[in-house]
Image (tube, rainbow, N blue to C red):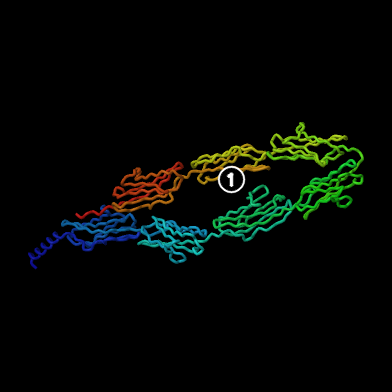
């Protein structure tokens, strides 16, 4: 080839290159799906002039080399390597090839998706038969998700009893009217285009209480100690209560109640007759309740409590011998003289009650003088006493064979004062209170019958307390005896505490004004549990008032409070309510990042809990959002919603929802990314 030919050929070659603009012969993939965390490579090939430059763009913004992006070009093949992709790397990528002769471009839409991951897995459920069950989990990752539920590996379909829901990041299975067949192993499987995950839980039915070991009937003597015990099984939490004769029992000086390790125990020390009765243990949980009962019999041996007094009487006068006793019925009482039992007849009259027995000799004779014995017995014991009756033919001065005793009465009730008098008849009786003679009237009645001097005082009041004296007279002399009457007043509430609505952190004080005879036992309760002074509260009490003070009220302090007041003649109680307002909290918030295209409306929903009234404010980048055609704000049924209508690029940013009430405030944030249109060819 000549030099001219070579120059021509070369010249033609250079001219041809200048005339050819870059053209992509291998374009970028139109769409590309990438798993979050993976790297991604975009590659394209171009023909054209040898001097070609490449530029890469994402959403119209030029990309520069960095630790994130690596751009290379080899033999007219351009590549863009993206390391550790995230959802934020999603977008429209453009490669522009340019030379002096012109340019060409190709594009790819890259979508980076996060595989599903359980933020909160299914939790085991212990449910009640017939109730509604919701199995709920929270998942992160890129929507849309495909959600499946399985029970014992068999798929669950939506039907009348089963409903599978997916809302935002919450996945739930709702089961209506739980049946025995719903017990088993449940699995939730969540999938999207880039991954799959699953979690499991067990569902069991709550077991109603049942008694493995029941109460047994018991019979014990006064003064002993007894433990009523039963063993339970059933689902916790379980509450156990005790009743005596259908009245609820509470812990007291001689009564201790415990429930540990499925064993319910009622422990009573120093048994008294009043402790006898029907005892019931009542167990309850969410699945049901069960009771078992037993009878406790407290037996008291027969015992003479007031012995017969020896007396002297005038021949021909009546004679009365009396003994008093206690013990568990049936009791057998009898009188004996010289070992022979005496029964009612023409000359003798025997009268017995559950607590006393009287032997009355209607007209005494000399032969009636002598030793008399009294015996009382039951199936657990026997007791006896003796006395001497002397029959004389002279006038005998009066004497008290049973004197007045200290007596207690209850305000508004009545009191009986009595004494037994012996001596020759006729005997006159006079009653005095604090040295003032008592006359029979509507309030006070005096009688003397069959040697018993009797004073009855009705409608007792505090002023009836005092010293009472009985004076007995006959021709041979005068005798007197005295006793104290003490009128006790049951507790009475004069001023009840007022219910209160307060803010968290407030100081709360409940006051009760009261009256009643000391000593008074005053207790405060919340949810049947006694409140004692501690670091967070103080209980003060005296004989006229009591206070419960909470130093720093918390939401958990809301509830019913009861003040119980008791003395040995009565009890009373009053109730009040405390409501501590609850500050707002977000129970459900939107996804952390939301990506939408230009013009694609977005609704953010926040579920708020707390005490009304709750005010909701929305902010973007620190500036409050005012409702308009572009921003619609609602707050209904505890759901605060912000709708961004037809968003533009400028609407991208951080949004805040703030909830406020009297008790406090709470806020949450979310990010909105509005993707722009691809740049146009030049």
Residue 550 percent coordinates (x, y): 54, 41
Residue that appears at 35% across and 43% down = 624
Label 1 environment density (alpha carbons within 10 Å; few <14, some 14–19, many ≥20): some
Count numbered badges in the picture. 1
Query: Residue 343: percent from the left, percent from the top?
Result: 85, 51
Residue 610 location, x and y as percent? 45, 46
Q: Is residue 432 above or below residue 521?
A: above
Q: Which residue does the numbered mark 1 point to in the structure image?
A: 525
In the image, residue 332 sits, relative to residue 147, either above or below, namely above
Quadrant position of residue 100: bottom left
Q: Identify the residue at image location x=44%, y=46%.
A: 584
**Quadrant of the image for the N terminus?**
bottom left
Q: Position of residue 502 (x, y in %)?
A: 50, 41
Of residues 239 and 288, the one nearer the viewer is 288
Residue plotted at (32% across, 44% down): 628
Q: For numbered disc 1, what is the local secondary structure?
A: strand
């Amino acid at each position: 080839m000549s030099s001219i030919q070579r120059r021509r050929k070369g010249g033609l070659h250079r001219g041809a290159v200048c005339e050819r603009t870059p053209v992509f012969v291998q374009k970028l993939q139109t769409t590309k799906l990438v798993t979050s965390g993976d790297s991604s490579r975009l590659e394209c090939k171009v023909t054209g002039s040898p001097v070609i430059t490449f530029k890469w763009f994402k959403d119209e913004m030029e990309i520069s080399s960095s630790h994130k992006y690596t751009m290379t070009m080899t033999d007219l093949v351009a590549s863009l390597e993206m390391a550790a992709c995230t959802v934020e790397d999603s977008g429209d990528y453009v490669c522009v090839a340019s030379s002096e002769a012109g340019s060409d471009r190709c594009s790819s839409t890259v979508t980076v998706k996060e595989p599903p991951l359980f933020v909160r897995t299914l939790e085991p459920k212990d449910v009640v038969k017939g109730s509604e069950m919701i199995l709920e989990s929270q998942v992160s990752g890129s929507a849309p998700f495909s959600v499946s539920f399985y029970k014992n590996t068999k798929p669950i379909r939506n039907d009348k009893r089963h409903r599978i829901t997916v809302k935002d990041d919450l996945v739930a299975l709702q089961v209506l009217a739980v049946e025995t067949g719903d017990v088993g192993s449940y699995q939730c499987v969540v999938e999207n285009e880039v991954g799959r995950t699953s979690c499991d839980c067990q569902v069991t039915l709550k077991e109603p209480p049942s008694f493995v070991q029941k109460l047994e009937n018991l019979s014990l003597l006064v003064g002993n100690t007894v433990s009523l015990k039963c063993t339970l099984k059933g689902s916790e939490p379980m509450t156990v209560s005790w009743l005596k004769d259908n009245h609820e029992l509470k812990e007291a000086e001689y009564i201790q109640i415990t429930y540990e390790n499925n064993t319910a125990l009622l422990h009573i020390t120093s048994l008294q007759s009043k402790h006898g009765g029907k005892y019931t243990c009542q167990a309850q949980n969410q699945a049901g309740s069960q009771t078992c009962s037993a009878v406790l019999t407290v037996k008291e041996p027969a015992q003479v409590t007031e012995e017969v007094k020896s007396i002297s009487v005038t021949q021909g006068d009546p004679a009365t011998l009396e003994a008093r006793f206690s013990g568990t019925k049936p009791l057998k009482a009898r009188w004996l003289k010289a070992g022979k039992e005496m029964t009612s007849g023409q000359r003798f009259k025997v009268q017995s009650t559950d607590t006393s027995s009287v032997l009355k000799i209607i007209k005494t004779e000399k032969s009636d003088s002598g030793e008399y014995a009294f015996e009382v017995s039951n199936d657990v014991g026997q007791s006896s006493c003796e006395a001497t009756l002397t029959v004389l033919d002279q006038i005998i001065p009066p004497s008290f064979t049973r004197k007045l005793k200290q007596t207690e009465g209850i305000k508004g009730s009545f009191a009986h004062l009595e004494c037994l008098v012996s001596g020759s008849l006729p005997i006159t009786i006079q009653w005095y209170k604090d040295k003032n003679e008592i006359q029979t009237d509507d309030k006070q009645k005096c009688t003397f019958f069959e040697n018993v001097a009797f004073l009855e005082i009705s409608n007792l009041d505090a002023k009836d307390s005092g010293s009472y004296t009985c004076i007995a007279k006959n021709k041979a002399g005068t005798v007197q005896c005295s006793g104290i009457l003490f009128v006790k007043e049951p507790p009475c509430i004069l001023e009840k505490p007022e219910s209160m609505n307060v803010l968290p952190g407030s100081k709360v004080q409940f006051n009760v004004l009261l009256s009643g005879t000391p000593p008074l036992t005053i207790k405060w309760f919340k949810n049947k549990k006694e409140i004692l002074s501690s670091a967070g509260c103080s209980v003060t009490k005296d004989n006229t008032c009591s206070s419960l003070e909470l130093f720093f009220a918390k939401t958990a302090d809301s509830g019913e409070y009861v003040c119980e007041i008791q003395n040995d003649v009565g009890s009373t109680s009053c109730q009040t309510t405390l409501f501590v307002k609850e500050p707002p909290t977000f129970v459900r918030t939107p996804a952390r990042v939301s990506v939408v295209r230009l013009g694609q409306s977005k609704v953010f929903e926040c579920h708020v809990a707390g005490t009304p009234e709750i005010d909701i404010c929305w902010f973007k980048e620190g500036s409050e959002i005012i409702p308009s055609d572009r921003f619609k704000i609602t707050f209904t049924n505890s759901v605060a919603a912000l709708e961004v209508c037809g968003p533009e690029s400028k609407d991208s940013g951080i949004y805040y929802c703030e909830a406020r009430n009297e008790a406090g405030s709470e806020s949450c944030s979310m990010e909105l990314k509005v993707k722009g249109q691809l740049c146009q060819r030049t």
